[in-house]
Image (cartoon, rainbow, N blue to C red):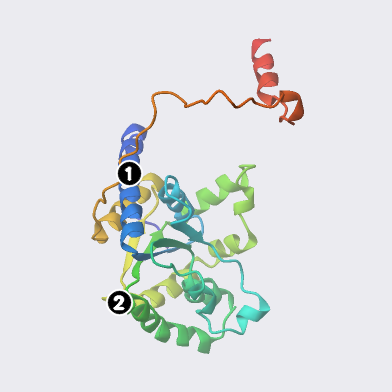
Amino acid sequence: MGKKSAKSPKLSKDVYEAELFRLQTELVNLQEWVRATGARVVVLFEGRDAAGKGGAIKRITEYLSPRICRVAALPAPTDREKGQWYYQRYVAHLPAPGEIVLFDRSWYNRAGVEKVMGFCTPEEHTRFLRQTPIFEQMLIDDGIIVRKYWFSVSNDEQLRRFRARRDDPVRQWKLSPMDLESVYRWEDYSRAKDEMMVHTDTGISPWYVVESDHKRHARLNMISHLLSSIEYEKTDRAEVKLPKKPIESGNYHRPPRSLSKFVPDHVASLLGDSET
């Protein structure tokens, strides 16, 4: 249950990196258009745990200004937030003019983990499915550009990635008890996702599914689609002129090194080890 067809051939690393850099260059152009025009862009990243959302977000933001493009990855709601209007804490993170916000999970938590794990009542879940298309219509009517991406991973590949996290000392923190529940409740999550799609995949705010068993393919496909879906233009930038060499007046004298506290030269110890 949940298995997909045989995997397609993989791109070579060189082709992947060249195309990724080309797309990242275009993302910079998109950023500058957003800055110049005052556009507001919201991108939702949803999908199963270990589906590749974080990796895609990391590649998108790699060369962008954090003052323009920021990531909203909200923690579990506090007791106070639990009593608020459900969308309220997400509204606080919506973009101002000239900003892009990438939601690493979003209000759709209610349609997934909250539904499956019983963190919301059936009435709250039903209300969410009814209100969300209206909420997103309001955002779009106000001029916000909204894009929704669902990263789809097979159960076999998800389990493989969980095992890789378990055995990797720098990624073990990414494997939580809630992640393990997504393995044991695969069909429950599938049903919840299908129901979510029926109610919230609308003409004005559609879902775009990203096949993500190949992480590199998923990143390129998702970023390419995002760029193609927004009618941005390359903006003119002021020409920057630099002197041929640093300009010095001759009146400045650097303080003695002995007055500063320098970090220890850790690299020197590594070089010493390599020479032995």
Q: Are marks 2 and 1 in contact (CB under 8 Å)?
A: no
Q: Quadrant of the N terminus?
A: bottom left
Query: In which quadrant of the rendered view does residue 117 lie?
Result: bottom right
Along the line of sight, the residue nearer the viewer: 35 or 266: 35
Q: Amino acid at mark 2?
A: Thr
Query: In which quadrant of the rendered view does residue 251 lie?
Result: top right
Q: Amino acid at mark 1?
A: Thr
Query: In which quadrant of the rendered view does residue 239 lie?
Result: top left
Residue 10 seen in this snapshot: no
- The crowd level at tag 1 (other Cα within 10 Å; few <14, some 14-19, many 20+) is some
Q: Is residue 48 above or below residue 162?
A: below
| Residue annotated with mark 1 | 25
Identified at 28% across, 75% down, the residue is 204
Q: Secondary structure at mark 2?
A: loop
Identified at 42% across, 85% down, the residue is 131
Along the line of sight, the residue nearer the viewer: 25 or 259: 259
Residue found at the far bottom of this picture: 123
Which mark is nearer the camera, 2 or 1? 1
Rendering coords of residue 12 (x, y %): 33, 34
| Residue annotated with mark 2 | 202
Q: Is residue 255 left or right of residue 180?
A: right
- The crowd level at tag 2 (other Cα within 10 Å; few <14, some 14-19, many 20+) is few
Q: Is residue 210 above or below residue 205?
A: above
Rendering coords of residue 244 (x, y %): 39, 24
Along the line of sight, the residue nearer the viewer: 241 or 123: 241
Along the line of sight, the residue nearer the viewer: 147 or 113: 147
Identified at 70% across, 20% down, the residue is 269
Please tell me which of labels 2 and 1 falls first in the chain: 1
Q: Quadrant of the C terminus?
A: top right
